[in-house]
Amino acid sequence: MTLDVEEQLTDVEVRLGETLCAFAVFKILNERADKESDASLNAKIQVHGQFWQATLVGQQTVHILGIGALVDKRPDVASLVSVLKLVRSKLPDDIATDIESRLTAMKTKYSDYRHKLFGHTAIDRRAIIDKFNAEEFTLEEHAADLADLEYVFKLLFQASRGSPLPTVASAKKMHFPYRQSVERTEADTHALLTAL
């Protein structure tokens, strides 16, 4: 069964929203609950530390798997790659090539971690964890990668409709339903931590 571009965009939008929400929780917990940033909050979290550790690992897993799903090249999945294939003819060649390069770079960057560390338990998992930690992925780097994927989604969405393509600045002003979910998730996470 092949999905048309609208159905694929809907599926990709849902995955993008889930990925952004998971990252929002992960980022806020890491920033606010750090011992150096708020020793009092950190102490409260340590009372139920295993729960918070599981929450962090779960959110990290969801956002890494989500990035991988968004750049998946397999023909039987809805992803930014599959949407690009459907709307490529509506894009200038240089923009289509740039998007393809961005998605390929993102897939290369995250695929080993997604597959061997988060999606499955590779035999060499300890070495993969060490490599992941050595790469020193920062929250800012993850946020920038997710912003890039969000921008690509908005470009492809506009191209699918034959609408003018947004710049990075104008894309930030474009709001989709998933953005409300992300904002609510951020507010709820802050409220939960404040209430502790």
Image (cartoon, rainbow, N blue to C red):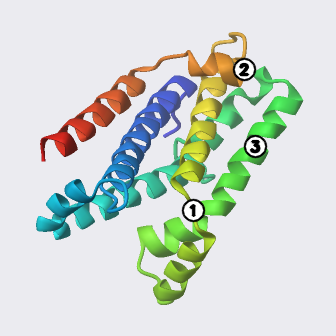
* Horizontal arrangement in the rendering, residue 97 relative to residue 158 (left or right): right
For residue 74, above or below residue 18? below
Regarding mark 1 in the picture, which secondary structure is present there? Answer: loop
Depth check: 140 or 110 in front?
Answer: 140
Residue at figure coordinates x 46%, y 74% from the top left = 117
Q: Which residue is mark 3?
A: 100
Q: Does the image show residue 158?
A: no
Give the numbered dot on residue 137: 1
Mark 2 — residue?
167
Q: Amino acid at mark 3?
A: Glu
Q: Are marks 3 and 1 in contact (CB under 8 Å)?
A: no
The residue mark sitting in front, 3 or 1, is 1
Describe the element under mark 3 as helix, strand or loop: helix
* Badge 2 or badge 1: first in the primary sequence: 1
Residue 77 location in percent, x, y? 52, 47
- Residue type pointed to by label 2: Thr
Q: CA distance from mark 3 to mark 1?
A: 23 Å
In the depicted view, which residue is nearer to us: 47 or 146?
47
Q: Residue at x 33, y 64 (%)?
A: 57
Residue plotted at (60% across, 52% down) = 141
Q: Amino acid at mark 1?
A: Phe
Q: Position of residue 82 (x, y in %)?
A: 62, 40
User: Label 3 crowding class (10 Å Cα cut-off): few <14, some 14-19, many 20+?
Assistant: some
Closest to the camera, between mark 3 and mark 2, is: 2
Q: How many marks?
A: 3
Q: Position of residue 120 (x, y in %)?
A: 42, 74
- Residues at marks 2 and 1, CA–CA distance in whole angstroms: 27 Å
Which corner quadrant of the image does residue 41 belong to? bottom left
